[in-house]
Structure formats: C-alpha cells, structure tokens
Image: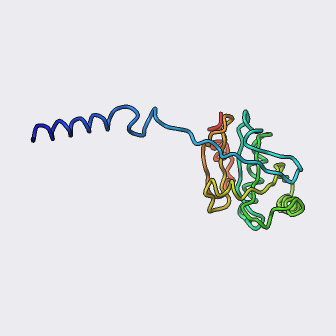
Amino acid sequence: MRFKATILILLLAAVSFSPGCLEGEGSETSEMVPEFTINADDEQEYGSDSLIGTSYILHFSASWCNQCRPTMHAVTNHLDNETYIVISTDAGDGDLQKLQDWHTQVNDSKQDSTVDAPFGMNIGLAQAFEINNTPTLILIGADGTVIDKHIGPMIDEAEIDEFWSQSK
C-alpha cells in the first residue's frame, strides 16, 4: 500500500510540473482590451476595433480630478501625435457639451499648453478595468493587448517615455 501511495504522489508531482500546468514563462496569456466604443467631444467615435493597428493610452479621469490635469498636459505635450484618449469615470460628464466644457477647462488650466486629445465617457470600460483611482493610464498595444497600467499622476518625461516605449 505504501508503494502505491508513493507512486501516486510521484505521478501527481510529475503532472504538476509538466509544461502548461504552471503559470510562468512561455505560458503567459495577454489580456485583450475589452470591446468598447467612445463618442468623444471632437464628435469622433473611437473603439477597440477601429484602434487595432495603433498603440494608444486610455487615461481614466473625471472632470473633478484636479491631479489628472497635469498628467493630461504632460503626456499629450511630450508624446508626438500618439493616440491618447481621456475617458471619464463619472456619469455626470456624459453629454457632449459637458465633455467639451471639461476639455476647455483642462486647456485653460495651464498657460501655453493644449491637451490635444479626445475626451469621452465609458463607465462600462472603467468597470471592466476595475478603475478605482484617477488618474489611471492603460497602455494598449497595436494588437489590442493590455501592456501596462499606471495609477496616479504621470508628469515626468522619463516616466512617460518608459511607459510609452513598452508599446514598441
């Protein structure tokens, strides 16, 4: 009986350590961005399907988030023509006029700086990413995979470069 138990333990151990049974190198699966569509203040539609082939940053924010504004200015002014989309997590920011007003307030918050990015709202996408803090930036690769998530302000150029360089 003891022999059978030993054999069983050895077999279970062998199966446990066989390829594909443990997470680790070679068995990682990439998280895909959830399917989404955003109607932005520039009256354009952005979505997971239309952005395939382009790396981009989703910046989760809200009109009341004052610490988000410096991040918006820093990222859009440092990255050259990269796709950057600001998404509100607050249902009160939803209509087109409110989004445009918020965008104007952000631009007026820093002299000689313009945030040239679409502002939209998609609470479902924020919930899918489990956004609990603003600002939160999600880096999406050209193939639609989630590359990185940054919580908190991002104003240092080296930090922005390091974050964005992961998409290349």
The residue lying toward the viewer, choosing from 107 and 34, is 34
Vertical position of residue 110 compared to residue 54: above or below: below
Q: How is the image coloured?
A: rainbow
In which quadrant of the rendered image does the C terminus lie? top right
Query: Outermost residue toward the front?
Result: 1
Vertical position of residue 10 compared to residue 34: above or below: above
Residue found 77% across the figure and 57% down from its top: 121
Residue found 38% across the figure and 37% down from its top: 21
In which quadrant of the rendered image does the N terminus lie? top left
Residue 63, percent from left and from top: 78, 64
Residue found 15% across the figure and 41% down from its top: 5
Vertical position of residue 109 compared to residue 140: above or below: below
Q: In the picture, residue 147 is in which quadrant?
A: top right
Left-right relation of 65 to 150? right
The residue lying toward the viewer, choosing from 83 and 18, is 18
Residue 49, percent from left and from top: 74, 39
